[in-house]
Every structure is written in C-alpha cells, then in structure tokens.
Amino acid sequence: MIKPILIRITTVPISLDKLIEGQLSFMKSNYEVLAVSSSGEILMQVGKKEGVRVVPIEMSRAITPFKDVKAVWQLYKLFKKEQPLIVHTHTPKAGIAGMLAAKLAQVPIRLHTVAGMPLLETTGIKRTILNAVEKLTYGCATRVYPNSKGLESIIKKHKFTKTDKLKVLANGSSNGINTSHFDPQLFTSTQNDNLKNQLGISANDFVFIFVGRLVGDKGINELVAGFKELSDRSDKLSVKSDESSMDRQQATTKSLNFKLLLVGPLETELDPLKSETIKEIEENSNIISVGWQADVRPYFAVSNCLVFPSYREGFPNVVLQAGAMGLPSIVSNINGCNEIIEQGKNGWIIPVKDTEAIANAMEKSVSDVASFNEVKMHCRKMIQDRFEQKVVWEALLEEYQRLENWHFEK
C-alpha cells in the first residue's frame, strides 16, 4: 500500500531537530515523510536520525522579499513534484512560504503550527507588515494549531483567522517532553561533580540556569541585570533553613554562593544584547556561558533553578525540560510559560521585563529553603502528568487521520 506523503517544514534545520524531534520518525508508520528546511549539516543529520528524506530550500528568518519569493517558488515546484496530501509548517517564515506555496499547488491539507509570534514585540510599519503576513499565512492554511491556549486567545483577539480554523492539540506544546530522556536519575553524582569542576562550580553553589538563544527578547538583559542585583545584595541575605529536607544540599546553601549558567548561542544579528549585558557576561566570574550544546541535560543536572524571563513564547520546551529534570522555574507571565508553571507549585511567575522581580524571585529561591524544597517536590510529576511526549504525538496523528478521512469523504 502506497502511503500518503507528509511534508514538514521549518525555516532553519535546528527547529526540525529540536522543535519536533522524534515526530518525523513517529509518523513514518502512516506516511511517507519529507522534511524541508534551509541547507546545512544539521538538516542532513536530521534526515539520518529520523530516517526520512530531506530537501534543502533556503529561507531567511529576516524580511528578505527576493529570497522569500524564491523560496515560495521552490516550494511550489517541490509540492507539484511530490503531490503531498499534507503540508505542515512551523516557524513564521516557513509558515508564510510553505502555506502560500501549498495553496498555489492545491495541496489538500495545509497545516500551520504557531509556536510564538515575533510580531508581538514590534511596532509601526513593521508590525503592519507582519500582521498582514500572519493573516495571509492563516488564510492559506486549512487548519491552524496554536501550541498554547494563550496563543489561541491572542490570535482570536487580533482576528488573524476564523475561530473554526483554530485548535490546541492535547494540553498544548509542539512536541511534548520525553520524560524518560529528560530524567535526573540518568546522571550520577560523579558525572555531575565532574561537570561542575569543568565549569568552576563549587559543591555548595546554588546554580541558576538559562537555556536558549542569548537575545534581547528572551529577557537576557533583565536576567543578567537581575543576577548582578542579587549579587550586590548577597552580603545582606540570610537563609531560612529547612532541616527536615533530605535534598537540602541540592536545594540551597547557607553561604549564599550562586552562579548563573547560560546555555545557548549568542546571536548578534536580529536581536542583539545590550553592550553592558555582554560586558557583564564576559567580566562577571559568577556568570558561566557555555554556548550552544547538543545535549542540555547535563547542565540541568548540575543546576538548581531555571530562570526564563522571555518576552514572548508559544509553548517553551525549555520549561518542560527543566521541570522533567526536577528543577523549579522562574518564568515571565506570558502564554505557554504560565500554562506550564503554576504559581508556588512548580515554580514562580513574574512580570515581563522586570529586573527587580527577577532578582527578588532568585533571592527567594536561594534564601527560603523550605519553600524551594516544597516546590521542587512537584516539578517532575506535574510535567509527566500533563505533557508526556507520546500524548502530543498521538493527538497530532489522530488529527492528521481525521483530516485525511474528511478529505477523502468529500
């Protein structure tokens, strides 16, 4: 039996690798899967890892009209050649190029997942252009999947598309989380101690971690400033101890030594950090920046608390990963983050772009041991119960099959 063709598209291949990791392979039982993204070694690696065909088509994350038209034309030719039943896009540029080309090529089922909206942080003529692009993307799609309830509300509020086109799958998230892979028990104390030694982290240091791109709209300027403020307060801080805790060494330290571990690439083109932020990262010996890492789990394993003060997200995998690794999270009050974290239960929610709130939340997590340990107890189970990966994959497969049946019944 010939399987129908499913084409999945992202702007850059790292999104195929991380945003929907495992999904391509999972869908192979029901579809012939083809992955499309910009060229590079990562795209080839995704093809081998997932066991699917890949096609490189250059797409830029910036506004580049000539390149964008070229990408639409190349996608159109690909769709006419492959005759897919389903085209499913992720990320804004892949969304507009892929959905427009699929509409022109008369692909029957055209799906777009919304995992974040960069336009929310723009103003003026650029915002007007991005609003129009968003509406065109959704207009060309047959279904649109916000990956959080918050994003669904934003789309409805701005009237980007008809309500009946929208659906949040499962409990949200683009890919869920494999809690068997993100499991702190996979890392021994010896492994953790060795990594701490490599990074210059002492046994009694309390480690805050950020994982993601080091850019402005991830809240890095405020995070670094908040950490500096916390450091300035350190001599005046005291610890409310929790003698009953069996995990006390992991949760706090009486000496109030702390580090900030930054895991992710420093990007200097689209949304660069302030010069004073870069200077602080370079000169503060308590800030450790390790760049992009293929496996972030060892870094979670040597950390105590995620700080993720992003301005905008769809449904952030990083917060899921941290929770699965047993870490409480300090997150900004934005969609996605405030659907994963429940205030005071598995973390703390703070206002967006608020340096003092970041410093205060970090101070509380370091100094109030009892509160921290209580929150830490719930983190992993709350992720397992709501966002296990197979739940998300099966919900998406069920949606594909529902739409497939609908198409052939017409």
Image (spheres, rainbow, N blue to C red):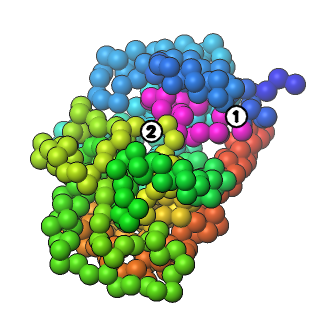
Label 1 packing within 10 angstroms: few (<14), some (14-19), many (20+): some
- Helix, strand or loop at mark 2: loop
| Residue at the (36%, 38%) spot, across then down | 291
Please indicate whether residue 299 sits to the left or right of residue 182 in the image.
left
Does 124 sit above or below residue 408?
below
Q: Judge by depth and name the residue closer to the eye, 146 or 369.
A: 369
**Which comes sooner in the sequence, label 1 or label 2?**
1
* Residue 271 seen from this side: yes
Which amino acid type is marked by label 1?
Ser
Please indicate whether residue 57 sits to the left or right of residue 352 in the image.
right
Residue 253 locus on image (x, y percent): 36, 73
Range of residues picked out in magenta = 7-26
| Residue at the (31%, 16%) spot, across then down | 66
Q: Which mark is residue 260?
A: none
- Helix, strand or loop at mark 1: helix
Label 2 packing within 10 angstroms: few (<14), some (14-19), many (20+): some
Does 278 sit above or below residue 37?
below
Q: Which mark is residue 25?
A: 1
* Residue 361 seen from this side: no
Pointer 2 residue: 293
Q: What is the tally of numbered marks visible in this picture? A: 2
Which amino acid type is marked by label 2?
Gln
As for residue 8 lying within the magenta part, the answer is yes
Residue 29 image-quadrant placement: top right
| Residue at the (70%, 51%) spot, across then down | 390
